[in-house]
Each structure stands twice: as C-alpha cells, then as structure tokens.
Image (cartoon, rainbow, N blue to C red):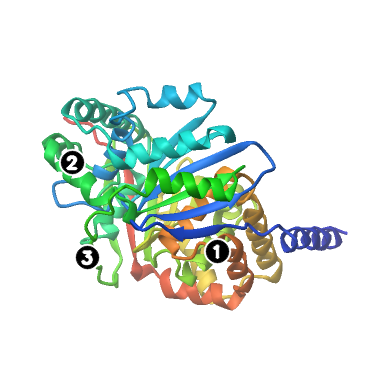
Amino acid sequence: MKKTLFSMASILLLSITSNAQEVEFEEYDLDNGLHVILHQDNNAPVVTTAVMYHVGGKDREDGQTGFAHFFEHLLFEGTENIENGKWFEMVSSNGGTNNANTSQDRTYYYEVFPSNNLELGLWMESERMLHPIIKQGGVDTQNEVVKEERRLRYDNSPYGQFLFAISEQLFQNHPYKDPNVGYMEDLDAASLEDFKAYFDKYYKPSNAALVVAGDIDIAETKKMIEDYFGPIPSGPKLERTYPTEAPITEAKRTQFYDSNIQVPAILTAYRTPGYGDRDTYVLNMISSYLSDGKSSKLYKKMVDEQKQALQIGAINLEQEDYGMYIIYGLPLGENTLEGLLEGMETEIAALRDNLISESDFQKLQNKAESNFVNSNASVEGIASTLATNYMLYDDTNLINTEIDIYRSITREEIKEVANKYLKPNQRVEVEYLPKKEDK
C-alpha cells in the first residue's frame, strides 16, 4: 500500500511540474550596456523592480575588504533628489517594501510596489545608480551600522563564524578566503576617495541587470526604462582577474575558537566547481540525500539512530568561481568530534562506493521537482531568479530549463561526482571549539 501511495504521489508531482506554466520574459540591452529583463504577470496589481550589480565581497584590493557589503548599506543614504534618510520612508509611504543583500559575487537591490508605482521604483533605482550622495557623514554612519551588524551576526553570535573558519582554510589565494562583510580595520582605514572610486568602478549600467516583473505593460515599461536609465553613462570597461587555487591533495586539520559557544563542532569542507557546472547540480542532490529532512542519511543515522549528534548537516554552497561543499556536526553528550568525523566519512564513502537505491533516487527527483515549483511561486522570487540566472549563470532561461538538468542526473553520476570531489585527501577539517579562558 505504501508503494502504491508513493508512486501515485510521484505521478501527481510529475504531472504538476510537466504542466507548470513557463516563465515568459523578454531581455535586451540599453546602449549604455544595462541588461534589462521584463516579466509580465497581470494576475495581481504588484510589481518588483530590482537591480543586480556584478560586484560582491570578492571584488576588493588587499586592505580594502568588505566594500560591496558596505555599499549595500551606503546606497540607501540618499541621492541628489532623495533626501538623506528618506529612502525607506518614501518606499513605505507609497505602499512598498524594499531590501538588499550582498554575496561574494553580486549585490541585489529591490522594491515591491503596487503596480501603479512602477515609475517610482524605476526612478529610485536610477537615482541610486546615477548620483547617490557619498559623503563622509554617510560613510561614518554606515560604518557604525556595519560594525553593529558584524557584532550581532558574526562576532557575538554562536557559530556565527562557521563560514569564515572554513573559507580561510579552503582558499589561500582567491578573495573568497576573506569574509564577505570584510574586516573592520579595512573599513576604518578607507578614505572617502576610496569609496567614491569603488562606486565609480562597479556601480554602472554595463555591470548591472535591471529586472521588472509583475503587473506591467511591456511597451510603457520599456519607455520608462529608457527615460530613467538610458542617459546614465556606461563608464570604462571593467577588467577583472582572480587568483586560482591549486587542487587540495592532502587533508588539512586546524582549529578555530569561538567564545560564544559551549558545544564544539566538527566542520569538513571540499572545494567544488562554480555556478553553472553540471557537477554543482549533482552536489546539490547529494546534499539533499545526506541531510534534507529527518529521513536523510546523516540525520537518520547520527541523530536519530546512534544518538551521536545534536545537529548534523551538509551544504553545497555555490559561488561563481569556486563552490564549497560543507558537512558539519555538533556532538551529543560524551560523543567526540572524531567520532562524528568517522560517521560522516562512512556515509560519504558509501556514496563513493555504491549506487544509491532506486527509492532514494526517486525521492531526490521528487524534491527537485517540488523545489522547482516553489522557486517560481511569486513574482518577487521570479525577479531574483531571472537576475541571478543572467548574472551568474549566463543563461536567463534556466528559470525554465534548470529542472531538466536535475531530471537528467543519474545514480551513476551521483557516485561519480562523490568520487571526484568528496575524498578524504581533498578536504579541510576544522575543529570549531569554545574559546579557552585566558589565565
């Protein structure tokens, strides 16, 4: 009976995804290089205006880390036509919401407005791009904001430096070795001219994508975009190169201390390919197999059955140049970090040595189908996906075709990729420990 129900659920999910409406969009470039993506959905009177800049934490010089994240905050200060401190008030008073976020590879700003305020959203983003106010007062204010964010989210948050503890070991040359938020001493030392030069270099039409999604008229929207963004100068051509990393051929063990924790953790990480590589999709499926839900292999064995771990997980962290495949665990009771590491390796070794079962493979396919449907469930989500697919994958239409990649992955491929990237000699191991008391 269970098999029958499982098969019926699989057929139903396949039917839903097979008939899911394709996300239609139009894309083109302005003369200044700004890439524009339009998606019309008139089902609800809302519209998302979003700009993604191809600049993130990795875009820095030595001694000038954290600038992209800093600008995520600074570019809300105001412009020549938006009074200092009035950005959020202007959005909310017109029925909208807005936010921004920065990764190592890109920065994303967006507003969600009632559709009759589309022009306002476009004007505000063009203001941000064309002539923001970058003055010492705003720099000083946002410097304190960033410091407080770092204290809350990283320095004083339990396990808040997990990612940095790994990245500084996985990367010796590439700027991924430094935290996205940067080092506070770099921001303190930066001059106003340093910040202005950074803006002039990266925040320009030819290094950005504009997405407008929702209740729009295409022709009217194109005219407004041309009016507001067309006159913005393209700026000089951007040249960038990033150092490469030699393959990891021998396991490296290190320790990292965090004064905010009482329970230690063991972290293992492997360097993996960047966005768009087929193997990254396989690694996503491996993460789902190992730790997505209570029936996943790591959770069921080490948390549920053997009571070894308080928490366990596997994450495929995708990035543009290199990815990071991370497995972590917190021991339960008297269990040791070494015991957790052995348990993790046992499950990874099983992936390297054997094909996963047909039933487990079908569950992975079903999860991929479900995630695909959910990712396109809102106009706001569609806007983000369109921008990301264009900027980091160089294929905007992945919003419609990415599921076909997951459908084409085989059990044999999962085994092959595990052998390619997840070997003991290709990883770093970090003991994440409570900080010792100073005597």
Q: CA distance from mark 1 to mark 2?
A: 35 Å
What is the secondary structure assignment of the residue under circle 2? helix
Check disc 2 and give the amino acid type. Answer: Lys
Q: Is residue 137 left or right of residue 209?
A: left
- Say which residue label 2 marks: 196
Residue depicted at 64% across the width and 47% down the height: 41
> Does 180 sit above or below residue 252?
above
Mark 2 crowd level (few <14, some 14–19, many ≥20, 10 Å Cα): few
Give yes or no for contact between labels 1 and 2 (Cβ–Cβ under 8 Å): no
Q: Position of residue 241 (x, y in %)?
A: 22, 65
- Can residue 413 be seen by looking at this rendering? yes
1 or 3: mark nearer the eye: 1
Q: Residue at x 65, y 57 (%)?
A: 367
Which residue reaches farthest right?
1
Q: Which residue is tagged 1?
A: 397
The image position of residue 53, as x and y in percent, is 35, 50
Q: Secondary structure at mark 1?
A: loop
For the residue labelled by badge 3, is the local secondary structure a helix, a strand or a loop?
loop
Q: Is residue 242 left or right of residue 154?
A: left
Quarter placement of the N terminus:
bottom right
Choose between 417 and 142: the one closer to the eye.
142
Please say if 409 is above or below 305. Answer: below
Of residue 151 and residue 350, the one placed in the foreground of this image is 151
Q: Are the two marked residues, 2 and 3, in contact with CB atoms closer than 8 angstroms?
A: no
What's the mark number on residue 243?
A: 3
Q: Amino acid at mark 3?
A: Pro
